[in-house]
Image (cartoon, rainbow, N blue to C red):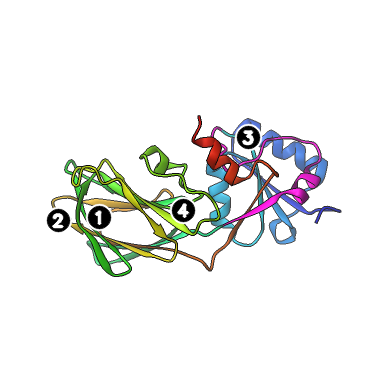
């Protein structure tokens, strides 16, 4: 893929990212996405998530020109085709969310990081949790709960004291957010083949919203989440700086 590599550059709106895209496009050439072999994303993790949501076919090689760059490689203008050719590929399957709301509608969305449920009023949410059609917890009183992928385990999940999941393990992390009852319950590790369902108890008194990578749905009655194995996002990382190394490094900062 190296000789005459066809690259499509995309950047966030920051000055550093825009300048980098202009510089690299002039040096290596820029083609439209239908003609490209690889997408080069210049920005932070927010841009990477946006690119992944919009693209399901081409591999994406990110370089950090933003604030948070967990999913990005280090920035350099030199030897870009060689770096991409030598990069290691990591496949990320998104989560598929279906949410039923109080107005009788159903809403579907994909999430690369996590699907979260959050209380939308002053009182704690009350959630019933089922896995593969079997009720596992009759009531969780909390500010919310989330299910994340391994790639998303260092984002909101980690801030909520959830576990970091190494890549290559077919598991998802279910994490409680400020659990009130049972107070010591922090969450669970689920196989990636599992279907998770939240049912909202007392939805009129204790409204809850759902969020799939910043795509919000208000007034949910129930939410079902599963890993969408048919969609494969392909991320490219420099050798020695792949996502597994980043997962380890994140736990020692």
Labels 4 and 1: the sequence-earlier one: 4
153 in the magenta segment: no
| Residue receiving disc 4 | 149
How many neighbours does mark 4 have within 10 angstroms: few (below 14), some (14-19), or many (20 or more)?
Answer: many
Which residue is under mark 2?
202
Coordinates of residue 234 in the picture (x, y in percent): 62, 56
Foreground residue among 182 and 154: 182
110 is higher (above) or lower (below) than 66? below
Tell whether 215 sits left or right of 33. Answer: left
Q: Which tag is nearer the camera, tag 1 or tag 3? A: 3
What range of the chain is rendered magenta?
67-91
The span from disc 3 to disc 2 (Cα, nearest Å) is 45 Å
Q: Please identify, in this view, whether the residue under mark 4 or under mark 1 is nearer the observer.
A: 4
Give the residue number, with chain letter if any, for mark 3: 65
The residue that appears at 24% across and 51% down in the rendered structure is: 208
Mark number for residue 24? none
- Tag 3's secondary structure? loop
- The image shows residue 52 at horizontal and vertical percentages of 57, 54
Callout 3 environment at 10 Å: few (<14), some (14 to 19), or many (20+)? many
Q: CA distance from mark 2 to mark 4?
A: 29 Å
Lower sequence index among marks 1 and 3 = 3
Say whether disc 3 or disc 2 marks the residue closer to the N-terminus.
3
Measure the C-alpha gap from mark 1 to mark 3. 37 Å
Q: Earlier in the sequence, mark 2 or mark 4?
A: 4
Identify the residue under disc 1: 219
Q: Earlier in the sequence, mark 1 or mark 2?
A: 2
């Amino acid at each position: 893929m190296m000789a005459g590599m066809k690259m499509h550059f995309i950047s966030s709106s920051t000055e550093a990212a825009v300048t980098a895209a202009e510089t690299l496009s002039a040096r290596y050439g820029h083609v439209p996405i239908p003609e490209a072999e690889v997408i080069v994303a210049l920005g932070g993790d927010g841009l990477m998530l946006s690119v992944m949501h919009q693209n399901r076919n081409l591999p994406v090689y990110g370089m950090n020109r933003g604030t948070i760059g967990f999913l990005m490689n280090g920035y350099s203008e030199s030897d870009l085709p060689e770096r991409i050719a030598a990069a290691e590929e990591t496949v990320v399957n998104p989560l598929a969310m279906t949410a039923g709301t109080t107005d009788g509608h159903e809403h579907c969305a994909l999430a690369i990081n996590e699907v979260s449920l959050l209380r939308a009023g002053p009182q704690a949410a009350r959630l019933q949790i089922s896995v593969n059609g079997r009720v596992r917890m009759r009531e969780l009183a909390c500010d919310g709960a989330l299910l994340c992928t391994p790639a998303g385990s260092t984002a909101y999940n980690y801030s909520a004291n959830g576990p970091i999941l190494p890549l290559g393990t077919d598991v998802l992390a279910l994490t409680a957010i400020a659990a009130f009852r049972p107070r010591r319950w922090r969450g669970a590790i689920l196989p990636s083949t599992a279907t998770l369902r939240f049912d909202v108890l007392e939805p009129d008194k204790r409204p809850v919203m759902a969020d799939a990578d910043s795509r919000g749905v208000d007034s949910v009655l129930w939410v079902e989440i599963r890993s969408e194995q048919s969609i494969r996002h392909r991320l490219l990382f420099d050798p020695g700086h792949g996502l597994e190394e980043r997962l380890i490094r994140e736990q020692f900062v």
